[in-house]
Amino acid sequence: MWDGTIVNYSSEEVSRKLGNAAASIGLVVDDPATSANAAADFLRSRGFKAEVVLDAEPELPIAFVVTDAMAGTTLNFRKHVIHLPRPE
């Protein structure tokens, strides 16, 4: 898969942790936490608020950035799908 849309219905707990965002832009990276922190630092340097959330879905290695730079949208950083845990 080169590009695609993932439709995900999040629990209330996950939605709350992510500021009730309606959408998320997903980016594949080698190190999700480092990339999310770099993105948040960049956004803050431009005057936006940005919070890194590492525990939205603890069973998955996905790092989110909740920001006011994009209304109702978060950024998420994850490894390629082949490096994610297999569903049980």
Image: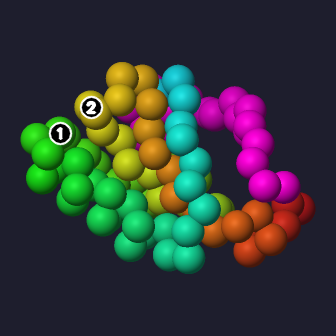
Mark 2, other Cα within 10 Å: few <14 / some 14–19 / many ≥20: some
Q: Report the front residue among 24 and 15.
A: 24
In the picture, measured across the screen, residue 45 lies left or right of residue 21, that is: left
Q: Which residue occupies 36% across, 23% down?
A: 71
Which residue: 30% across, 65% down? Answer: 38
Asked whether the beta carbons under mark 2 and mark 1 sit within 8 Å of each other, the answer is yes
Q: Position of residue 63 (x, y in %)?
A: 48, 59
Q: Which residue is mark 1?
A: 48
- Whether residue 46 is visible to the viewer of this picture, yes or no, is yes
Amino acid type of disc 1?
Phe
Q: Is residue 33 magenta?
A: no
Q: Residues within 10 Å of mark 1 (few under 14, many from 20)?
A: some
Residue linked to disc 2: 68
- Please tell me whether residue 17 belongs to the stretch shown in magenta: yes
Is any part of residue 85 visible from this angle?
no
- Under tag 2, what secondary structure? loop
* Numbered range of the magenta stretch: 1-20
Image quadrant where one finds the C terminus? bottom right
